[in-house]
Amino acid sequence: MVYSITYRRPAHVSSASSSTLDSDGKPNSISSGSTGIPAGIPDALSFDRIIAGGTCPPCTTRDFMNYLLYIERAAENLQFFLWFRDYSKRFDETPASERALAPEWTAEQAAAAADLAQNLASARKTKLSPEAAAMLKGTDFAPVPKVPTADSRANPFNTPPETPGDEKADELTLSDGKSYTTNEKSMSGSRVPIAQKAAEAFDSAELKWQPFTVQPFREEINRIITTYLAEGSPRELNMSSRERTAVLHALANTTHPSAFRAIAATAEWSLRYQAHPNFIRWTICNGNRPRVIFARGLGVATILLGFIGAVVITLSNAGRAWRVLAALGWVIGVATLVAAWKGMCVVLHGMHHRHLRPWELFAEDDSASVDYEMKKASFDTVGTTNSYEDEPWVAKYEKRNVIRKVFDREVWIQEPALRSIQDTIFLQAIGGGLFVGAVFSAVFVALPKGGFY
């Protein structure tokens, strides 16, 4: 099966499109299954289908996560999106008596929190001059630095402190049965308790009260705050100070999933309209960069050989019909060059193979290594940063010589929709080669023979 001959692969998305933003410059509200699919992506490779696990390698959720982790270096959006989807499901399954403790954060409350965040941001930018501060000194209008409260002050709603020296990891279990552990030392390399980090995040939003710990999932929300929302967190989401303040105000009042409405919509928009098209475009490439460069050079060399052959025959006493033989080099060369320009190697495509990614090459050798197993933590909701520079495959791949990279190990492409896209691109490349070959052949056939030998 092939797609239309006019098919074009997804365009690279580098920034937000103004057509998908509202009047405030925010992504429009989106709901799962209700959004259109970007151009160049078939239904079989849609974002929802990949997230639901309905695709085969190299287009699975794991491949999508690896792409965001190693290529775009923005895996936090997908990590947060997967957690939020699972959290919403688990929250809806909690007893009604517990859900009543965390009411829904309405649109009106969200708008009020956004306005408050804007006012706070404006106030932070406004600084008093030394003269004005001196005039207001001793009055009720003098700026007073915030004095941290003592941790020893009794509060019946606060979570009891942990036993000193207790390094026991906390465990959370998701609705799909998977569990993961998090140690407070692993988050930002600090031993500061998660509850204290969350409290500092609330203080940074200038909240006058701490949230009630009796609300469901409050401890988990604290972990999410210290992982994705707080400034300098291990997997800090790309958000403005206004957005951060607004969501922290919402989380101070409730643990209902609606408190994440704004940042969840932003993360999903980024995944659907930026990361997903770029992932499909990247996946279409069946060869690594050295192989693609090699294919481009091979295509150019074949085209030049075609020209050399055409010139030699034209200058000889051979008949005009012999000049058509040069078209073979032009067709093959142009087809190879066009396919390589789109990241494909025609030799690999002939077998429906692809090169293994650098992080896949050494999986078998490092499968027993603890360091290698750490990369599987990319699916953990909380944990360390998304840095991969210390993974063992990085140093090994850098030491690999160029020849080995060009002829790296290959694997069969299992996803039928991806094979269909590559078949379409291959036919387009052949069509381009035939057209160019026909034009050049007509030009050389029309020339008179040289008769030099």
Image: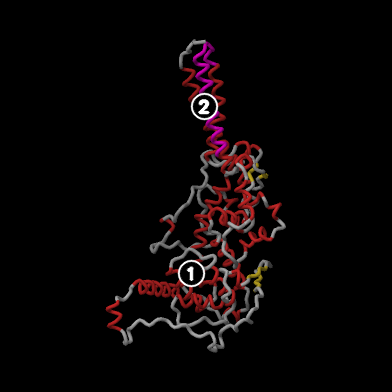
- The answer to which image quadrant residue 194 occupies is bottom right
- The answer to which image quadrant residue 381 occupies is bottom right
Q: Report the Cα–Cα distance between label 1 and label 2.
A: 57 Å
Determine whether label 1 and label 2 are within 8 Å by CB. no
Is residue 248 one of those drawn in magenta? Answer: no
* SS under mark 1: loop
Residue 43 or residue 52, whichever sits in front: 52
Is residue 320 one of those drawn in magenta? Answer: yes
Q: Quadrant of the N terminus?
A: top right
Tell me if residue 44 can be seen: yes
Residue 171 or residue 117, whichever sits in front: 171
| Residue 300 image offset from top left, x and y in percent | 52, 31
| Magenta stretch in the rendered image | 293-321
* SS under mark 2: helix
Type of the residue with mark 2: Leu
| Residue 353 image offset from top left, x and y in percent | 65, 42
Residue drawn at (67%, 43%), measured in percent from left and top? 409
| Residue 415 image offset from top left, x and y in percent | 64, 48
Type of the residue with mark 1: Glu
Residue 446 or residue 404, whichever sits in front: 404
Q: Which residue is mark 1?
A: 231
Q: Which residue is mark 2?
A: 304
Q: Residues within 10 Å of mark 2 (few under 14, many from 20)?
A: some
